[in-house]
Image (spheres, helix red, strand yellow):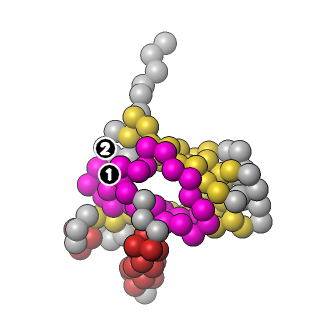
């Protein structure tokens, strides 16, 4: 039952991504509107994300799965984050990059910036 729910969520998110695609090349910086899907392939996985404004905060949903049919060994995973306006959540990828999701205004939009991860030395 849980696997069917996750597969259904992934299919729904992929359908949204087909309607309003944002490719990995566009992910250097983009602004997402509510229910606008962003699709990214990073570090051997495929990530589809979208957000909904709920009670003045951004509810970010990410569905993470294998690439090109590789999901047979690794079932898709759904992650939800709640981000307050003016705050950001950082998601690190296995490809050495990080995605910063910032909730804007009154949760009317999200800014997504892809950056290289850097270690700070002191």
Tell me the number on the disc at residue 95.
Answer: 2
How many C-alpha atoms fall within 10 Å of the one at disc 2: few (<14), some, or many (≥20)?
few
In the image: residue 52, left or right of residue 37 = right
In the image: residue 122, left or right of residue 94 = right
**First of labels 1, 2 by sequence position:** 1
Residue range in magenta is 23-51
Residue 64 in the image: x percent, y percent? 39, 63
In the rendered image, the vertical position of residue 86 relative to residue 77, given as above or below: above
- SS category of the residue bearing label 1: strand
The residue nearer to you, when weighing 90 against 40, is 40
Residue 119 in the image: x percent, y percent? 42, 25
Whether residue 73 is visible, yes or no, is no
Residue 96 in the image: x percent, y percent? 34, 39
Instruction: Report, in whole angstroms, how far the alpha carbon at label 1 lies from the one at label 2.
Output: 6 Å
Tell me the residue at 70%/60% (across/down): 108
Tell me the number on the disc at residue 42.
Answer: 1
The residue nearer to you, when weighing 98 against 114, is 114
Q: Quadrant of residue 45?
A: bottom left
Tell me the residue at 53%/66% (across/down): 36
Q: Is residue 29 magenta?
A: yes
In the image: residue 24, left or right of residue 107 = left
Q: Is residue 48 magenta?
A: yes
Q: Quadrant of residue 107?
A: bottom right
Tell me the residue at 71%/45% (across/down): 86
Whether residue 87 is visible, yes or no, is yes
In the rendered image, the vertical position of residue 11 relative to residue 80, given as above or below: below
Q: Are marks 1 and 2 in contact (CB under 8 Å)?
A: yes
Tell me the residue at 29%/50% (across/down): 43
Quadrant where the image shows the N terminus: bottom left
The residue nearer to you, when weighing 6 against 97, is 97
In the rendered image, the vertical position of residue 96 relative to residue 118, given as above or below: below
- SS category of the residue bearing label 2: loop
């Amino acid at each position: 039952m849980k696997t069917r729910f996750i597969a259904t969520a992934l299919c729904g998110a992929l359908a949204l991504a087909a309607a309003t695609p944002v490719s990995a090349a566009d992910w250097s910086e983009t602004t997402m509107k509510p229910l606008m899907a962003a699709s990214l392939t990073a570090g051997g996985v495929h990530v589809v994300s979208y957000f909904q404004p709920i009670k003045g905060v951004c509810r970010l949903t990410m569905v993470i799965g294998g690439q090109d049919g590789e999901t047979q060994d690794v079932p898709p995973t759904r992650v939800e984050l709640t981000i307050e306006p003016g705050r950001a959540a950082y998601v690190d990828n296995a490809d050495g990059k990080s995605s910063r999701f910032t909730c804007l205004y009154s949760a009317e939009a999200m800014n997504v910036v892809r950056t290289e991860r850097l270690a700070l030395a002191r």
